[in-house]
Image: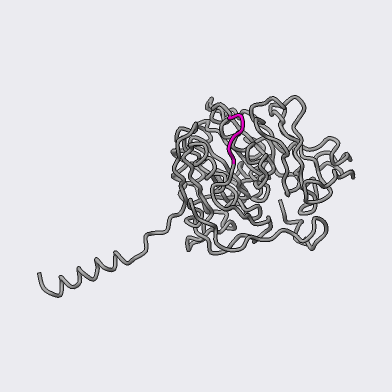
Amino acid sequence: MTVRVVFALVIGTLAMQAAPPPARDSVTYPARSGPGGGRHIVFLTGDEEYRSEEGLPMLAKILSQRHGFNCTVLFSLAPDGTIDPKNTQSLSNPAALETADAVVMLLRFRNWPDDTMSRFEKLLQSGKPIVALRTSTHAFNGFPKDSRWETWNYNNAGGFGKRVLGETWLTHWGRHKVEATRGAIEPGQQNNPLFRGVSNIFGETDVYEAYPPSDATILVRGIVLKGLTPDSEPADYRKPRSTDKVDQGVNDPAMPVAWTRMNKNANGTTNRIFTTTMGAATDLENEGLRRLLVNAVYWGLNLDVPQTANVTYVDDYRPSFYGFDGFRKGLHPSDFELGKTVPGEPLPRPASGRGGNYAHLSLSR
């Protein structure tokens, strides 16, 4: 072996040692001991407005470190590997779906490639439980006519949302970024195990118009408030429903904001479905809502729901207020690893609970 060859090998070895490790496209939180028994929960983030890329990692950390679930969080990524919720065709590491025991999702208007959609469809057809938040009622859009996935579009007879979760996108029932939501447990459901330890449900997002099907069990109705704080008074105006144009009091009756149903697939399997139209990253600051979602994971997996599930944050949590293009730029999945504080400043809340310049709101769904 010549001196030149030896020198080249040494240089090559040093270069490989100095090169940074390849960027990870998802983040996994290994399960600690707990009733979850290492079951694999896959979290699907990907919405342009409600900061699922911030809220779901926080929830996954709680389920892994406080309850014993193995949790993997997938993201929408830009070509450079940074998190970009606006890339509707991206879902990182979709192979994780193959070993999922359950899915927690907050998606909006996704149109994933065939391979990713096929993996998700296979999970659905296998009967795995789904916990769906906020804009997941309109998770998919943009598949072209005659595409295999055309019927998944939210505006195709309600698409995946209507068929599987129980509702699709209709309207903002409360005024967006002006009127928050107070959760009211449906009469007769107080002893439902899903409500163990749950009280004072509140979210800064507005109520969506929603009419779950007759086979759904309504759990929570959303009281439209006059402001964005928990002590705001209930709104008292009237407005027409989008479905039949009949006027009703905005809280008479209040719209459902959380429900369960059993989705029966054509192959004979059944998915246990929990859906809530709440769930922005700032909504998840509410302890009652966090506990309801943790309880929903237990319920979906047919596990005994804890009497008072521990939903204390694992790491510092300072979520961004919701808004289009309000995501923190330049973040990687590794920024959400255990023990880390997410870099960057969160998008601040509006200065006031009422008013403000929201000229773009007609685009919000």
* 31 up-or-down from 347: above or below: above
Please give the name of the residue rendered at 80% of the width and 61% of the height, measured from the top-left corner: 356
Q: Main secondary structure of the magenta part?
A: loop
In the image, 221 versus 168, the foreground residue is 221
- Quick check: 245 left or right of 333? right
In the image, 107 versus 190, the foreground residue is 190
* 330 up-or-down from 235: above or below: below
Please give the name of the residue rendered at 51% of the width and 61% of the height, measured from the top-left corner: 82
- Quick check: 211 left or right of 237? left
Where residue 135 appears, x then y in whole percent? 66, 46
Residue extending farthest to the bottom is 4
Residue 177 falls inside the magenta stretch: no
Residue 310 falls inside the magenta stretch: yes
In the image, 43 versus 340, the foreground residue is 340
Where residue 100 appears, x then y in whole percent? 47, 38
Where residue 353 appears, x then y in whole percent? 80, 55
In the image, 312 versus 327, the foreground residue is 312
* 63 up-or-down from 307: above or below: below
Give, as a single range, the part of the protein colored magenta: 306-311
Please give the name of the residue rendered at 69% of the width and 60% of the height, measured from the top-left corner: 348
- Quick check: 163 left or right of 94? right
For the rendered model, the colour scheme is one colour
Residue 192 figure quarter: top right
Q: Quadrant of the N terminus?
A: bottom left
Where residue 49 appears, x then y in whole percent? 66, 55
* 25 up-or-down from 188: above or below: below
- Quick check: 226 left or right of 27? right
